[in-house]
């Protein structure tokens, strides 16, 4: 089944656009990455299981697992396997992209049938189209790709906003994403492409422009929660009918227990995820109402 259709179906059935970023932070003074009494795998899996009813997907960030060596990668595998058993879509936040056979190996690692295989992966387009072709080839097998287009970090504009052929560079990337995904839109029922984009929620005006440039793309919006984006900001890239956008929260969700005296990680995360689901749904409802008023 077309990846975009699977994601749209899961979103419709759960009435949710929530993506759980399973990012176990590294230990730092005053901010332990793993709660006392937990192993890495137990902490991550408890969060996934607790939030499964409110979310459509999980998005583990590879860096936090790779930094912990073999233990970390075993935990990554456990997270992915548990998420699948719970019916959640898995997105490897790997941001890979390289030339030739290296890119093919990355695509096989995260979109093949091996230990690290997920339903979708994030990719970096900086080295050009040929670096993404091995990932795009996997789309025919029901996999999904999210191309970095406009990211949520404060210095993202340093390069992404540079003028290229009379417009910001990120807009040129968005136009290419639209082209790469065009062949797959008609293959599904949702009208959405499995070649999606990462567009940060911290720049809602750019998110709205991104939707204009990529009308059929599924847009993954990071930045909600710890990075400061509101629910309205987070769904700014949604289509007028409220579809085509999923929203990620990572630190604010995994570490919600730190804001509650005696709170257990799973319980606190579950409450946060459900509150996030309801808040995003309200923002999407407002967006749909706005869209109807404009067409009336």
Image (cartoon, rainbow, N blue to C red):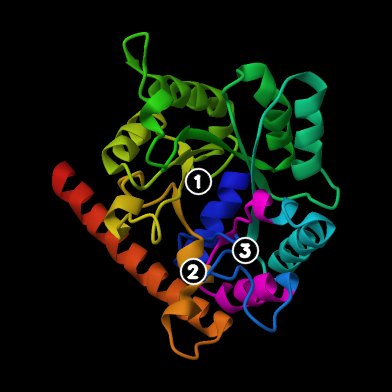
- Which marked residue is nearer to the observer: mark 3 or mark 1? 3
* Helix, strand or loop at mark 3: loop
Residue 1, visible in the rendered structure: no
How far is mark 2 from mark 1, CA to CA?
A: 29 Å
- The location of residue 93, given as percent across then percent down, is 62, 47
* Helix, strand or loop at mark 1: loop
- For disc 2, the marked residue is 253
How far is mark 3 from mark 1, CA to CA?
A: 33 Å
Q: What range is drawn magenta here? A: 42-64
- Which marked residue is nearer to the observer: mark 2 or mark 1? 2
- For disc 3, the marked residue is 24
Q: Is 51 in the magenta?
A: yes
- For disc 1, the marked residue is 190
**Which residue is located at x 69 percent, y 49 percent?**
119
Quadrant of the rendered structure where residue 181 is? top right
Quadrant of the rendered structure where residue 143 is? top right
- The location of residue 206, given as percent across then percent down, is 31, 35
- Whether label 3 touches label 2, CB < 8 Å: no
Q: Is 256 in the magenta?
A: no
- The location of residue 132, given as percent across then percent down, is 66, 25
In the drawing, does residue 273 fall left or right of residue 76? left
Residue 50, visible in the rendered structure: yes
- Relative depth, front residue between 29 and 253: 29
In the drawing, does residue 43 fall left or right of residue 164? right
The count of marks equals 3
Q: Earlier in the sequence, mark 3 or mark 2?
A: 3
- Whether label 2 touches label 1, CB < 8 Å: no
How far is mark 3 from mark 2, CA to CA?
A: 11 Å
- Relative depth, front residue between 31 and 113: 31
**Which residue is located at x 50 percent, y 87 percent?**
263
């Amino acid at each position: 089944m077309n990846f975009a259709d699977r994601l749209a179906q899961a979103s419709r059935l759960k009435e949710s656009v929530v993506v759980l970023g399973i990012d176990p932070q590294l230990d730092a003074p005053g901010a332990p990455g793993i709660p006392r009494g937990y192993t890495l795998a137990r902490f991550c899996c408890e969060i996934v299981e607790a939030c499964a009813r409110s979310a459509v997907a999980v998005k583990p960030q590879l860096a936090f697992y790779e930094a912990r060596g073999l233990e970390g990668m075993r935990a990554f595998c456990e997270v992915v396997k548990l998420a699948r058993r719970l019916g959640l879509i898995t997105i490897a936040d790997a941001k890979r992209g390289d030339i030739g056979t290296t890119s093919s190996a990355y695509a096989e690692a995260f979109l093949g049938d091996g230990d690290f295989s997920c339903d979708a992966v994030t990719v970096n387009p900086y080295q050009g189209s040929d670096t993404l072709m091995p990932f795009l080839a996997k789309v025919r097998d029901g996999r999904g790709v999210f191309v970095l287009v406009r990211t949520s970090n404060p210095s993202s504009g340093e390069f992404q906003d540079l003028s290229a052929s009379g417009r910001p560079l990120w807009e040129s990337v968005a136009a290419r994403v639209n082209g790469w995904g065009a062949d797959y839109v008609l293959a599904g029922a949702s009208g959405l492409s499995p070649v999606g984009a990462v567009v940060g929620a911290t720049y809602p005006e750019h998110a709205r422009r991104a939707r204009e440039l990529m009308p059929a793309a599924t847009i993954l919006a990071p930045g909600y929660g710890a990075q400061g984006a509101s629910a309205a900001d987070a769904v700014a890239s949604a289509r007028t009918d409220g579809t085509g956008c999923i929203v990620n929260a990572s630190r604010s969700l995994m570490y919600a227990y730190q804001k509650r005296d005696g709170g257990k990680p799973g319980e606190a995360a579950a409450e946060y995820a459900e509150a996030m689901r309801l808040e995003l749904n309200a923002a999407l409802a407002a967006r749909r109402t706005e869209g109807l008023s404009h067409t009336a």
